[in-house]
Image (spheres, grey):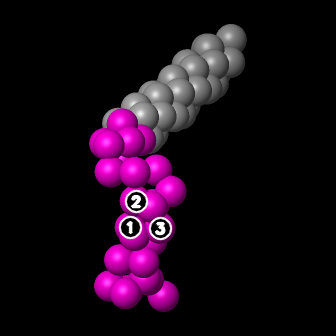
Amino acid sequence: MGIGLTEGLLIVAIVTLLFGGKKIPQLGKTLGESIKGFKEGLNEKSSAQTEKSKDQKDT
């Protein structure tokens, strides 16, 4: 079950009405930066856990 063409266009129309055409690129940039930060945080946590498990195996 995915979003069809009609549903996608309806969502775009509602977002445009709510935020206006000038704010949409700014919202996209902010969303992209947020996703990037989230992924970096996950990678840091994952690498920290890997290092911690390696340290525990060494002792």
Mark 1, secondary structure of its residue: helix
| Quarter assignment of residue 51 | top right
* Residue identifier under label 2: 16
Looking at the picture, does residue 56 appear above or below residue 17? above
* Residue identifier under label 1: 12
Mark 3, secondary structure of its residue: helix
Task: From the viewer's perspective, tell me whether residue 58 is left or right of residue 39.
Answer: right
The answer to whether one can see residue 25 in this image is yes
Q: Please tell me which residue is depicted at 42% across the width and 34% down the height of the picture.
A: 30
> Was residue 44 drawn as part of the magenta stretch in this picture?
no
Mark 2, secondary structure of its residue: helix
Q: Please tell me which residue is depicted at 32% across the width and 51% down the height of the picture.
A: 21
* Residue identifier under label 3: 14
Q: Given this view, does label 1 or label 2 mark the residue nearer the observer?
A: 2
The answer to whether one can see residue 50 in this image is no
Q: Return the x and y of residue 39 as percentages of the image width and height.
A: 46, 36
Residue stretch rendered in magenta on the structure = 1-28
| Quarter assignment of residue 31 | top left
Q: Return the x and y of residue 7 as percentages of the image width and height.
A: 43, 82
Q: What residue type is labelled 1?
A: Val
Q: Do the residues labelled 2 and 3 touch (CB within 8 Å)?
A: yes
Looking at the picture, does residue 7 appear above or below residue 44? below
Looking at the picture, does residue 44 appear above or below residue 16? above
